Image (cartoon, rainbow, N blue to C red):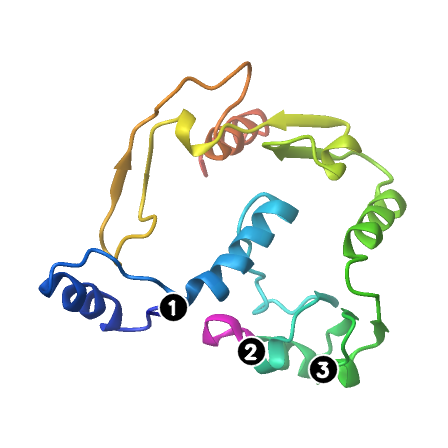
Amino acid sequence: MQGSPKGLENPLLHRFATSFGSPNVVPTGSVCFAPRWAASLVTTGFYPHSDLKQPPELLLVWGSNHLSTSADGILAPEVSSTIREGSKVILIDPFGRNLAKRSELWLRIKPGTDLLLAIGMIKVIKVEFLVVADLFMTPTAQMADIVLPVATHFKFDDLGFYGLPFGKILARPKIVDPPGECKSDVKIINELAKRLKLEDVF
């Protein structure tokens, strides 16, 4: 078992398992990082991390307990510092937790009603133009002005460190051709950057 590796424990754990012939290492990340990663993909299409070193005017915290859990060991001090520097907080959470006391507004929603609130907020906030890149026709995509179809990782050549120890890279070849006009997220971002005259950066 392992959590998010912070040092040599990850390669040592793999070495320990393989020393007696087992290739199996089951990470506790399945109840830690994996849900964060999966929820991010479903809601935003990627795994974002806020740049809190440039304090925003407002933090919208949805169903998280940053001050106590401190994802990756960095979120709690960053959130605390941002609040101290004057950022206001809106908390969306059925439970108060310790962040509720430091919030300008606490929306105490019923468990399971997140999607309804999110769709309602999108309908209110969307006043100009919405572009969504997604694998599926999600409720958010249905409200978009333009939907950019995304290819799954089986449909393009890629390099990455998926499930590998730090410092190792895996070449992942395409298995099938993408249907229609589907493109990888990287291809979509690069194409958009070209059209916005950002070739020097991308």
113 is higher (above) or lower (below) than 56: above
Q: Are marks 2 and 3 in contact (CB under 8 Å)?
A: no
Q: Is residue 22 left or right of residue 105?
A: left
The mark found on residue 35 in the picture is none
From this view, report whether residue 23 is shown above or below residue 191.
Answer: below
Q: Measured along the vertical axis of the image, is residue 34 above or below residue 108?
A: above
Q: CA distance from mark 2 to mark 3?
A: 11 Å
Give the labeled residue for mark 3.
97
**Residue numbers of the magenta segment:** 70-75
**Mark 1: amino acid:** Ser
Q: Residue furthest front?
A: 21
Q: Is residue 198 visible?
A: no
Disc 1 element? loop
Name the residue: 79% across, 78% down.
103
The residue pinned by badge 2 equals 69
Picture quarter with the N terminus: bottom left
Q: Are marks 3 and 1 in contact (CB under 8 Å)?
A: no
In 3D space, how far apart are the residues under numbered discs 1 and 2 (Cα atoms)? 13 Å
Residue 50 position by quadrant: bottom right
Q: Residues within 10 Å of mark 1 (few under 14, many from 20)?
A: some
Q: Residue at x 82, y 46 (%)?
A: 119
Mark nearer the N terminus (1 vs 2): 1
- Report helix, strand or loop for mark 3: loop
Residue type for callout 2: Thr
Residue 182 horizontal/vertical position (percent)? 53, 22
Q: Is residue 82 visible?
A: yes
Instruction: Give the residue pinned by disc 1.
Output: 4
Q: Is residue 51 above or below residue 87?
A: above
Q: Is residue 71 magenta?
A: yes
Q: Which of pointers 2 and 3 lies earlier in the amino acid sequence?
A: 2
